[in-house]
């Protein structure tokens, strides 16, 4: 038996099939992955993501330390509650983890992946010399992600009843990638599905009652299976699959998360990335693949890529699935930057696929052409 | 919980076999197998008229989660395939033992049927 979140009994009550996920007993699906997926695209779903690790960073040097630790620049977070997505890199520019960091009233809060918790914490501790910072894990908090076109409306009603109409208005006014503290809750407009929605961090003991309120309001419980198909349709990376410590953020569609300016900010991995940047085209890229014929693209499949000079080079699928929204296969693949055409090796047969920007579905709609 | 109808024979690779009155056999995948696979989205049907040997890969079932081979439980000729699965592969999830059947085979060596598992034995393996 693994670790259990505060909602474990609720998952069983909802008929979840439980699997081990990074040492946690988590729901992979309740009834049908496709029905859960569709519920998030068309109505609203709730995910228990309490297995993720919350770390609060405080102390006089919290900001300067994070500017050194992370590839994105927390100085860009101008107001309390604002958030950004970033990689935490090693010296060679490989991705140790991807995470969201929030500016809190005092200090910052990071939410990192559960499977990488120990190495992340060890890395952070090893990089503290010369900085006065304290790291505090927050295992007493649960995290609920409520996502889908109806998600915010339902959350506003619950916030209004639990707190006040004024607090509900605060949540309603949140911009994407910003959050607000409401008593013991922190509510942020973030998510991992490509839909509107919020993530709520709240004390473990409050989570089951909120879960019940959400389900009573028609929100469907969503397992990790649909979480994966939703994030892949949205073109969002999954750590350990689409990138890891051997992969540059520039090869993982994370270039936009690197804050190159100000130039004098020396973050871990910067030297390596500066070198890589001087030779664009040499690094592989993370691209989207679309296959409209029958079959499913799977992680690990070989991608035969034809370059502009006619030569061929192999790439690999890093995440692949059947897209429940589009009703055909989609994938993320790491391929040579100069690839003109690609075909995927499916059981020995080369199937031509279309090359698109990573990102397939946003707010229920197809986004590539 | 998975169902294991008593009137069927099973394989360790999760196919089921029903012997019909005319001596042909109908084949599908077990309730347990469809549950493990989750939502089925594509099925590569065997070809009608194909002659196959027991334990040959005869079909591929793809769910959102995984691709899984289906093995011939018995040798013979494929005399019918369930074409409805092409447009409605999810029938294999909702009705694995009736509308979700895969194909019918005319056995060339009916004694192979004796090597198949009965419901209790198969259910025991799935625990």
Image (cartoon, rainbow, N blue to C red):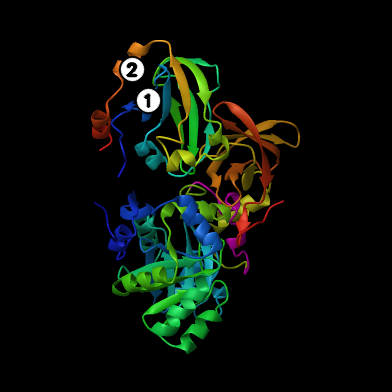
Relative placement, left or right, of A207 versus A102 is: left
Earlier sequence position, callout 1 versus callout 2:
1
Quarter of the picture containing the N terminus of chain B is top left
Q: CA distance from mark 1 to mark 2?
A: 9 Å
Range shown magenta: A246-262
- The reply to whether the magenta stretch includes residue A258 is yes
Main secondary structure of the magenta stretch: loop
| Contact? badges 1 and 2 (CB < 8 Å) | yes
Q: For mark 2, give the secondary structure.
A: helix
Q: Nearer the viewer, residue B99 or A310?
A: B99
Residue of label 2: B113
Q: Nearer the viewer, residue A136 or A153?
A: A153
**Mark 1 chain:** B
Relative placement, left or right, of B65 versus A203 is: right
- On the image, the x and y values in percent for residue A100 come to 48, 66
- On the image, the x and y values in percent for residue A97 come to 46, 56
Q: For mark 1, give the secondary structure.
A: strand
Choose top left, top right, bottom left or bottom right for residue A359.
bottom right
- On the image, the x and y values in percent for residue A150 come to 53, 70
Residue B31 visible here: yes
Quarter of the picture containing the C terminus of chain B is top left
Mark number, residue A192:
none
Q: Nearer the viewer, residue A297 or A287?
A: A297
Residue drawn at x 42%, y 26% as measured from the top left = B27
- Is residue B30 positioned above or below A321 on the image? above
Q: Nearer the viewer, residue A235 or A166?
A: A166
Few, some or many residues within 10 Å of mark 1 (<14, 14–19, 20+): many
**Mark 2 chain:** B
Mark number, residue B17:
1
């Amino acid at each position: 038996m693994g670790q259990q979140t505060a909602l474990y009994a609720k998952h069983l009550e909802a008929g979840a099939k439980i699997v081990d996920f990074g040492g946690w007993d988590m729901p992979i699906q309740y009834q049908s992955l496709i029905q859960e997926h569709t519920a998030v695209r068309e109505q609203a779903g709730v995910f228990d993501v309490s297995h993720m690790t919350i770390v609060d960073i405080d102390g006089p040097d919290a900001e300067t330390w994070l500017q050194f630790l992370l590839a994105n620049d927390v100085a860009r977070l101008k107001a309390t509650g604002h958030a950004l997505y970033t990689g935490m890199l090693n010296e060679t520019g490989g991705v140790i983890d991807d995470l969201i960091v929030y500016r809190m009233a005092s200090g910052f809060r990071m939410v990192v992946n559960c499977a990488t918790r120990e190495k992340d914490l060890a890395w952070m501790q090893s990089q503290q010399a010369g900085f006065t910072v304290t790291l505090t894990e927050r295992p007493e908090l649960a995290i609920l992600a409520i996502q889908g076109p109806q998600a915010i409306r339902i959350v506003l009603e619950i916030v209004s009843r639990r707190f006040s109409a004024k607090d509900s208005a605060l949540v309603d006014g949140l911009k994407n990638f910003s959050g607000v503290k409401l008593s013991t809750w922190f509510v942020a407009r973030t998510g991992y599905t490509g839909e509107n929605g919020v993530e709520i961090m709240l004390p473990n003991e409050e989570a089951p009652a909120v879960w019940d309120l959400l389900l009573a309001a028609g929100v469907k419980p969503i397992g990790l299976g649909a979480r994966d198909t939703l994030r892949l349709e949205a073109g969002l990376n999954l750590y350990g699959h689409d990138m890891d410590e051997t992969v540059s953020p520039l090869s993982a569609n994370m270039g936009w998360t690197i804050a190159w300016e100000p130039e004098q900010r020396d973050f871990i991995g910067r030297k390596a990335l500066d070198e890589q940047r001087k030779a664009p085209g040499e690094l592989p890229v993370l691209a989207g693949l679309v296959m409209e014929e029958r079959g499913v693209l799977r992680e690990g499949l070989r991608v035969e890529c034809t370059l502009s000079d006619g030569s061929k080079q192999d790439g690999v699928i890093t995440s692949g699935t059947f897209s429940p929204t589009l009703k055909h296969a989609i994938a993320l693949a790491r391929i040579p930057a100069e690839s003109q055409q690609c075909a995927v090796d499916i059981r020995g047969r080369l199937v031509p696929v279309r090359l698109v920007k990573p990102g397939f579905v946003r707010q229920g709609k197809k986004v590539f052409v | 919980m998975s169902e294991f109808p008593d009137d069927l024979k099973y394989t360790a690779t999760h196919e089921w076999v029903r012997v019909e009155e005319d001596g042909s056999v109908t084949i599908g995948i077990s309730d347990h197998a469809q549950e493990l696979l989750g939502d089925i989205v594509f099925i590569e049907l065997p070809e009608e008229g194909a002659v196959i040997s027991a334990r040959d890969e005869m079909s591929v079932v793809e769910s959102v989660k995984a691709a899984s081979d289906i093995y011939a439980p018995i040798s013979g000729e494929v005399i019918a395939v369930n074409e409805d699965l092409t447009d409605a592969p999810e029938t294999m999830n909702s009705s694995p033992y009736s509308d979700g059947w895969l194909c019918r085979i005319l056995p060339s060596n009916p004694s192979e049927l004796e090597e198949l598992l009965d419901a209790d034995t198969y259910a025991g393996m799935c625990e």
